Amino acid sequence: MLSLHPPPSPQEPRTTGRIWISAVQWAVFVLAAVVVLATVRLWLDGQRHFSHAVQLQEADADWVTVVGAFENAARAWMPGSPWPERALWHLSVMGRSASMRGDVAQAIFVWEVVRRSILSTRYWQQPNVSYLAMAEAQLVRLHEQAAAREAMGKTNTVVLQRPADPSPLFSLLIFVGLGTWILASLLLCVSSVQSAGKRRAVLWVLSVSGFALWAGMSYVA
C-alpha cells in the first residue's frame, strides 16, 4: 500500500526542545568545569603559600613576612583543604610565643591576622571556629593588658565586634545569577535562536540580569 506522506529526511532539524536540552547540558558542563578548575586552583594556591611560608620560617626570615605568607595560606580556604588549618596552627604558635616573650604588640598583630584570615573565609558557614574563638580571647586579654599598663592599673573591658553572619540567601542568589548568565549566553550562541528576534532579546536581558545578580550578590555577600 502506497503512503501519501513523504519519507522523512535523513537529517531532521533539531527542535526547540532539543536545543534547550543541549544548551542546558552545555551550561551544566561549563559550570562544573569552572567549579573544578576553581577548586583545584584554590587547593594548589593554599599548598604553595603554605610551603613558601614554611621555607621563610626555616630561613629565619622577618617575622612580618612569615606572618604574611601564612596569612595567604590561611585565606585559601576550601572544604577539605588542610593548608589553611595548618597555617592557622603556625600563626597561633607564633602568637603564643610572642605573648610569652612579653612582646604584646607582636602578639596582637599575629592574633589579628588569625582573626581576619578566618573571617575572610566566611560563606555558608564559619570555618575554623575554634581558632577564631582562641584569637578573640587572646586579643581581648592582650588589649586589656596593654590598656592596664598604659592606665597604670586601671582595668578596661575590650569587646570585639564581628561582622554580620553570611546570608544563605545571598549565597544562593550568587549561584542563580551565575547559572542564568552562563545558560542565557550559551543559548544566544545557538543558530536557531539568533534568528528569533524576541527570544534573542529575552536571552540578552536574562544574560545581563544574571551577570548583574552574580556580581552584585558577590559584592554584598
Image (cartoon, grey):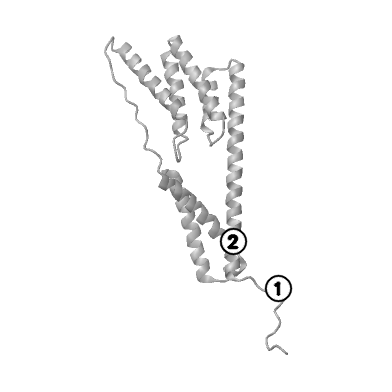
What secondary structure is found at the residue carrying circle 2? helix
Which residue type does callout 1 highlight?
Gln
What secondary structure is found at the residue carrying circle 1? loop
Of the two numbered discs 2 and 1 on the same chain, state the one appearing first in sequence: 1
Residue 65's mark? none
Residue 11's mark? 1
* Residue at 60%, 20% in the rendered image: 56
* Residue at 31%, 22% in the rendered image: 158
Residue 158 in view of the camera? yes
Total marks shown come to 2
Residue 194 in view of the camera? no
Which residue type does callout 2 highlight?
Ala
Q: CA distance from mark 2 to mark 1?
A: 20 Å
In the rendered view, tell whether residue 15 sits above or below residue 188: below
**In this image, 203 relative to 33: left or right?**
left
From the top left corner, tell me how far across and down residue 218 is, in percent: 46, 45
**In this image, 25 relative to 149: left or right?**
right
From the top left corner, tell me how far across and down residue 41 is, in percent: 60, 38
Q: Residues within 10 Å of mark 2 (few under 14, many from 20)?
A: many
In the rendered view, tell whether residue 49 sits above or below residue 154: below
* Residue at 67%, 86% in the rendered image: 5
> From the image, which quarter does the N terminus lie in?
bottom right
Residue denoted by label 2? 23
Q: Residues within 10 Å of mark 1 (few under 14, many from 20)?
A: few
From the top left corner, tell me how far across and down residue 64 is, in percent: 51, 20
Residues at marks 2 and 1 touching, judged by CB atoms closer than 8 Å = no
In the rendered view, tell whether residue 90 sits above or below residue 181: above
> From the image, which quarter does the C terminus lie in?
top left
From the top left corner, tell me how far across and down residue 21 is, in percent: 59, 63
Q: Quadrant of residue 119?
A: top left
